[in-house]
Structure formats: C-alpha cells, structure tokens
C-alpha cells in the first residue's frame, strides 16, 4: 500500500483509469471470449465500455452478434475493431461480410413487406440481374423486358449487345451445320454459304477454315469426295499480354483441377446435369485458364480418395488445386456433418460416403499453396465458416498469391440445391460459375467470382451460394486466383 501511495497523483490516476483490473472484469472478459452468445454479448459490452482499446473483445462481440443475427450491431463492433487495428485483415473481412449480410437481410425484409404494387419493380430488378449476369435466350428476353422499363440504360444495352452477338454466332453455326450431307437444296446451300461468310467476317473461324468448309459444301453438289477440314492449332496457354504486363512479378504458380461429376448412380436417383456440368467446367479451366485437369465422371469413393492422395503426394508450394464436385450430397442433421455421395453410395450405408471432414483433412495435408473446393451439391455449406476479402489491387493479388488459402465455394448452405435450369443443360450454380469464368479477361479471385455468381443463382433457384475458408484446414488469409490465359 505504501508503494502505491508513493506514486505521483497523476500516475496513480492514469493507472486507475487505464487498467480495468478486478475479478468482475476478468470474469466478464473470459465470458466475452468463450461464453455462450446470449451471455457473451453483455459481457463483451461491459468489457469494451471499461476498456475501449480492447480489440479482441470487440471482435468477440461482433462474432457473437453475428451468430445472434444482430447484424447492425455486429457491423458496429467490427468497425470499432478496424478503427483500433486498421491493418488487421481479419477484422476488415468480417466487417465487409457483416455489412454485406445486413444489406441482403434488409433487401429480403423489404421484399417480404412490399405491397403488391411493388411487384413490377421487383420483376424489373430481376430482369436486370438476368440480363447482365446470365446468358442464353432467357437472358436476352430479360434484357428486352428491362429495356422497356428503362430505355437507353447503358448497362442493359451493352448486355443485350453481348448476348445478341453470342446468340447470332450460335445461330450461324447451326445454320452452317444444318445442311444435308448429300445434296442441299439451292436455298439451303445459299444460306449455309452466307452463314459461313458471316462467321469468317466475325472472326469466329479463320480464312483457312472458311475456305475448307466452303469447299466441303460445294463438293456436296459436284459429287466430289469430301475434303478434310483444316483445324486450328490449339494455342499453348500463355497469359494474355495485358495480364502479363499488369501483374508482372506476381508468381501465380501452376494450376491443377480435380473435376468430379456424378449422375449415373447405382443405388440412388440419377441426376440430370452433373456430368455435363463437370465436363463444361473442365473445358473452361483447361482451355481458358491453362489448368492441368483430371476429370472423374461417375467415380467411386476409391477413385476420388486415390486422386486426392495423388495430389497430396505430388503437389508443392508452387501449385494451386481446384476440386470441383457435382453430385448428390447428404446432411447428418444431428452431427451437422455433410457428405459427398460417390456413384457407389447407398442411402442406408455410409461405407462409400465421403465426409466434409475428409475433404477438409485432405486440403489441410496438401502442400499446395492454394486449394479451392467448389461443391455443387445439397448441404455443401457445412464445409465453411464466414470470411470475405477486400479490394483487388496488384498489391492485393500479390499478397493473396503468397499466402496459404484453403477455401470452399458451395452452391448452397444447409438446403437442397437445384439439379437443372429450365434449359436443362446445367445446374443454376454450374451455369453461373462457368459464365463468370468465361467472361473474365484478366485475373479474378474467388471472392469476386462468388460475388458475380451469387445473385444469379439466388434469382434462378431457391438456394444461396456461400464462399468462405474451410474450417480448421490451415487457411492463412490468401485467396484462389484465376488467371486468364
């Protein structure tokens, strides 16, 4: 006591103000960090009132409020944490996610409470999303409807022009290929030759390919034997010049993909599009991003585990691995554990199921710097926990490329997901995933890819995609980077 009284009065006052020491404060802080959410929140609030510089308490308060779905308060707690440590990436990530979820919750709440008179405006908003984010005839029709409500809108006009160009090219290809293999009628011949010329003028086919196909069509009339078509040599995948110059010095590494599609189940109901989805994903990864792809269709549990073991043994720090799964999923509600169901899975036996824990353990054990699991199956959200990434500058991409990443992009949370769209070729998730990759012309990270596909999937199917780090898999703040070749 004598030692304390010998302190100068100012120092003693500062000690009392800046050091909230005591049994009650210590108990509150322990409850704040480790307690159940309902009691943690008031405990954290008392702690931060006593010590407004306690970064960990603000973070724990934000986490508890998120779990209680009090998103506005959580955003404020994370904001305080960021103000205390402006360079803390984890705090910034959680603040962005809380604000994003708050904005979405407000939107959904407004949707539910909106009167019937607002339905037309909502339909127009959906048409805008379909027009600007989707592809195909349905998206083009949405553009036309949206432009009737907002004529002259530059974003809608640009999207319509893009979609019309894609549709025209597909139509020209169909016309060019639709002629008889023997002797086409004069009108059909003229149409095919005209379609060929327009494909050449649009740089869809080369002059050499045009000449070969034109000769092929004309030979059908003269009776001459068919001529082998000149094929364009497949280019060696190299980064586009703009990408190379803009991101010079960033070591993106080598890219690998294990793409799995299941639809011909032996003991479970068949799916319609999973194998088509897997093949289309494999094509775009291989052709546009230079991935070395291993494609497994209707694979057994043993096939999948063997492939994962091979990657574990062969990949190193300079490698990136994407694992894409399309097939049945299952949720053990008691254990809150998700499973992938290979082609040999049985409903009443887990012998051939693959748990999300197995996927997590495989990702954690691999030496690859970046591992991204993309799961288009029911209940795929059990892999993840919430996290988001900030703005994408060259410095940001350099940091993301250098940091270890273990991430999962799932087609839905804890709900069933759709197998096919109205068009029937791909699931809503796969269609949006493929479209986002095809339209990228530079470097896109997983978070930006997620932001592009999330709303189209929500609009076209009763499911909400999720993107986050894989729980307990060694994630260290990086992100998966797709580099257009």
Image (cartoon, grey):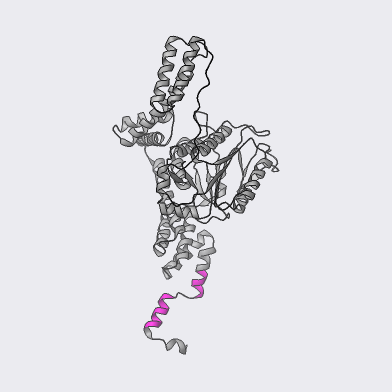
**Which quadrant would residue 328 be assigned to in this image?**
top right
Drawn side of residue 127 relative to residue 377, left or right: left
The image quarter containing residue 225 is top right
Residue sitting nearer the eye, 184 or 222:
222
Q: Residue furthest left?
A: 152
**Residue 15 among those drawn in magenta:** yes
Q: Looking at the picture, tell me which residue is in the foreground, 92 or 24.
A: 92
Camera-side residue of 73 and 417: 417
Q: Main secondary structure of the magenta part?
A: helix
Residue 121: % across, % down: 35, 36
Residue 450 drawn in magenta: no
The number of numbered discs placed on residues in the rendered structure image is 0
Asked if 431 appears above or below 333 in the picture, the reply is above
Residue 136, x across and y down, in percent = 44, 29
Question: For the magenta stretch, what is the residue range?
Answer: 10-28
- Nearer to the camera, 408 or 315: 315
Q: Can see residue 141? A: no
Residue pictured at 67% horizontal, 44% vertical: 306
Q: Percent position (x, y) of residue 263?
A: 61, 33
The percent position of residue 101, horizontal first and vertical second, equals 44, 49
Residue drawn at point x = 45 percent, y = 39 percent: 436
Q: Is residue 295 visible?
A: yes
Residue at figure coordinates x 31%, y 32% from the top left: 149
Residue 240 lies left or right of residue 306; in this view the side is left
Asked if residue 234 is positioned above or below residue 179 in the image, the reply reads below
């Amino acid at each position: 006591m004598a030692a304390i009284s010998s302190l100068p009065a100012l120092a003693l006052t500062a000690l009392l103000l800046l050091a909230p020491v005591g049994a009650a404060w210590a108990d509150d802080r322990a409850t704040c960090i480790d307690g159940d959410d309902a009691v943690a929140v008031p405990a954290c609030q008392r702690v931060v009132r006593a010590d407004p510089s306690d970064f960990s308490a603000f973070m724990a308060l934000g986490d508890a409020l998120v779990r209680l779905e009090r998103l506005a308060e959580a955003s404020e707690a994370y904001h305080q944490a960021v103000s205390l440590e402006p360079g803390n990436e984890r705090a910034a990530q959680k603040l962005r996610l809380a604000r994003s979820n708050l904005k979405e919750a407000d939107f959904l709440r407004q949707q539910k409470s909106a009167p019937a008179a607002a339905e037309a405006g909502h339909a127009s908003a959906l048409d805008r999303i379909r027009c600007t984010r989707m592809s195909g005839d349905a998206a083009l029709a949405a553009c036309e409807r949206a432009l009737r409500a907002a004529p002259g809108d530059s974003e809608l006009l640009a999207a319509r022009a893009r979609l019309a160009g894609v549709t025209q090219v597909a139509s020209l290809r169909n016309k060019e290929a639709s002629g008889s293999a023997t002797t086409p009628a004069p009108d059909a011949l003229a149409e095919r030759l005209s379609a060929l010329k327009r494909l050449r003028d649009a740089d869809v086919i080369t002059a050499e390919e045009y000449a070969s196909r034109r000769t092929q069509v004309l030979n059908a009339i003269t009776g001459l034997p068919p001529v082998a078509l000149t094929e364009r040599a497949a280019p060696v995948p190299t980064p586009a010049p703009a990408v190379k110059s803009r991101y010079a010095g960033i070591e993106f590494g080598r890219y690998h993909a294990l793409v799995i599609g299941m639809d011909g189940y032996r003991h479970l109901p068949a799916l319609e599009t999973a194998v088509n989805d897997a093949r289309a994903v494999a094509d775009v990864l291989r052709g546009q991003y230079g991935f070395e792809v291993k494609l497994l269709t209707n694979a057994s549990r043993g096939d999948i585990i063997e492939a994962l073991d091979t990657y574990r043994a062969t990949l190193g720090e300079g490698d990136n691995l994407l694992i894409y799964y399309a097939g049945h999923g299952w949720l053990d509600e008691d254990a809150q554990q998700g499973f992938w169901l290979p082609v040999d899975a049985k409903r009443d036996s887990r012998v051939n199921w693959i748990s999300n824990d197995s996927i997590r353990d495989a990702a954690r054990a691999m030496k690859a710097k970046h591992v991204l699991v993309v799961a288009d199956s029911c209940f795929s959200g059990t892999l993840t926990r919430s996290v988001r990434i900030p703005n994408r500058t060259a410095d940001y991409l350099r940091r993301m490329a250098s940091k270890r990443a273990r991430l999962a992009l799932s087609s839905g949370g804890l709900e069933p997901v759709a197998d096919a769209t109205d068009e029937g070729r791909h699931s809503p998730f796969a269609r949006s995933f493929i479209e986002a990759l095809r339209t990228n012309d530079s470097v896109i990270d997983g978070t930006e890819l997620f932001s592009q596909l999330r709303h189209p999937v929500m609009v076209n199917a009763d499911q909400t995609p999720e993107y986050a780090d894989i729980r307990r898999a060694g994630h260290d703040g990086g992100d998966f980077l797709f580099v257009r070749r």
